[in-house]
């Protein structure tokens, strides 16, 4: 009986023990299940966090690779292969490894200095010497007295006249200045008697300047480089006989010649003019003259006062109206005044039209009003008006004789620097191109050139 009781107690104790052990196993199962769930949730959270870090590092790598730095230039070593894809069971560990690999490659990737220029030897240890510094140009007063290299320019008349009107107030020159005579050729085409003028100018370089105003269509006329007329054409405009654009052409010639500060005397010529004395005689006559030579006189009748337009009043009155030869010679002072005129020329251009013939009235009137004491009131160019008509007589081949040329040189009763025995004419016109042969023949015998 007693043994049965003991067996029942042992059986109850074993059952209680089993029940307690089963309870403990159940608790352990719940604990491990909760721990596994917590670990799984933590792993997923860390995976997304590391992924964000990876994306941020990738963005910074892209930014660094797109910015060029003068001292950090990556070498041309090929990039390492991308890391293998992370195992699906452990995404966080794989992403951390990938991030560490990228960061480590950024830190330890070698950099080289900028490549040398193509013309420098990369093996050379010393850089090429720097170029010598450019010295600033130092100007001297002599450059101011140098004539323009060419007569060509793109200035308008307004710009040209403004530039040419500049004049120093101090009359004494700071260096020795050799005065020159400017020969202004107003032509309809080429200078037809150029070979005669070539002989005239020969051996006198530095004492003269040449300027040619011609019709625009004739600027392409062939002139040999050896000619004194080569490159001496100025920018020209169309000119019509008897119109004020002829006066404008004369002023344009004066303005271009005034750009050379060494030009002291200015003489207007045409393609039909010839010199009747040698260069030294003409040069000394003009340079030493105390006056200019602009013809101006009051002429009653249809070809004098009859050309006056009353609409010119009050700037120009009938009493001030003058007539004279177109072919002038003047000094630098008067040339500056002519191109600077902004009072009389506009009035002539507006009202002197048709039969007015401004080339015979503008300069005589302008000089007579303001500078009558500065001119000898005569021309230095002989013209034969004895045959009458609107144009002077034109000399042909048979008219050119030795006696005729000597006659032109014989007029010597004109006032010059206060004396009444001076030479009257230095030039003559109108000579046809067919007279060239005979002029060249007699020039050494009569004109001494």
Image: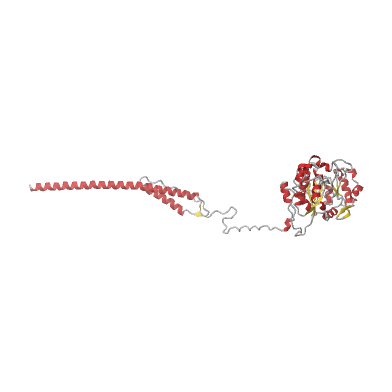
Q: Residue furthest right?
A: 403
Judging from the image, the colouring scheme is: secondary structure
Q: Residue at x 34, y 47 (%)?
A: 43
The picture places residue 95, in percent across and down from the top left corner, at: 39, 48
Q: Residue at x 72, y 50 (%)?
A: 162
Most foreground residue, 31 or 327: 327
The picture places residue 438, in percent across and down from the top left corner, at: 88, 46
Q: Residue at x 28, y 46 (%)?
A: 34
Most foreground residue, 246 or 129: 246
The picture places residue 253, in percent across and down from the top left corner, at: 77, 48
Q: Is residue 54 visible?
A: yes
Most foreground residue, 93 or 194: 194
Horizontal relation, residue 342 to residue 121: left or right: right
| Number of numbered tags placed on the structure image | 0
Q: Is residue 220 visible?
A: no
The picture places residue 14, in percent across and down from the top left corner, at: 16, 47
Q: Residue furthest left?
A: 1
């Amino acid at each position: 009986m007693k043994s049965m009781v003991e067996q029942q107690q042992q059986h109850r104790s074993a059952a209680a023990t089993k029940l307690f052990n089963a309870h403990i196993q159940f608790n352990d199962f719940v604990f491990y299940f909760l721990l596994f769930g917590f670990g799984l949730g933590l792993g997923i959270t860390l995976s997304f966090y590391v992924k964000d870090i990876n994306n941020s590092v990738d963005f910074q790598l892209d930014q660094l690779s797109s910015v060029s730095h003068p001292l950090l230039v990556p070498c041309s070593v090929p990039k390492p292969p991308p890391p293998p894809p992370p195992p699906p069971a452990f995404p966080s560990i794989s992403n951390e490894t990938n991030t560490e690999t990228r960061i480590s490659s950024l830190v330890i990737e070698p950099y080289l200095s900028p490549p040398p220029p193509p013309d420098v030897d990369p093996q050379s240890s010393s850089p090429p010497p720097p170029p010598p510094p450019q010295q600033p140009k130092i100007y001297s007063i002599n450059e101011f007295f140098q004539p323009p290299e060419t007569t060509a320019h793109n200035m308008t008349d307004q710009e040209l006249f403004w530039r040419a009107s500049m004049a120093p107030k101090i009359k004494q020159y700071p260096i020795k200045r050799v005065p020159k005579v400017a020969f202004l050729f107003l032509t309809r085409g080429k200078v037809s008697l150029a070979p005669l003028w070539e002989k005239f100018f020969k051996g006198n370089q530095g004492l003269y300047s040449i300027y040619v105003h011609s019709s625009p269509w004739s600027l392409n006329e062939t002139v040999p480089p050896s000619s004194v007329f080569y490159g001496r054409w100025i920018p020209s405009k169309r000119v019509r006989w008897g119109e004020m654009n002829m006066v404008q052409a004369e002023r344009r010639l004066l303005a271009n010649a005034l750009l050379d500060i060494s030009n002291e005397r200015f003489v207007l010529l045409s393609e039909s003019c010839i010199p009747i004395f040698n260069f030294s005689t003409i040069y000394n006559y003009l340079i030493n003259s105390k006056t200019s030579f602009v013809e101006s006189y009051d002429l009653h009748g249809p070809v004098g006062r009859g050309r006056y337009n009353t609409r010119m009043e009050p700037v120009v009155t009938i009493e001030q109206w003058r007539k004279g030869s177109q072919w002038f010679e003047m000094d630098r002072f008067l040339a500056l005044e002519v191109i600077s005129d902004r009072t009389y020329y506009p009035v002539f251009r507006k009202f002197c039209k048709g039969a007015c013939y401004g080339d015979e009235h503008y300069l005589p009137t302008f000089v007579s009003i303001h500078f009558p004491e500065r001119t000898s009131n005569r021309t230095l160019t002989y013209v034969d008006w004895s045959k009458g008509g609107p144009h002077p007589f034109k000399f042909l081949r048979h008219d050119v004789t030795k006696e005729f040329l000597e006659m032109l040189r014989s007029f010597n009763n004109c006032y010059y620097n206060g004396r009444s025995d001076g030479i009257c004419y230095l030039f003559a016109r109108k000579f046809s191109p067919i007279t060239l042969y005979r002029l060249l023949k007699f020039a050494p015998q009569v004109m001494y050139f």
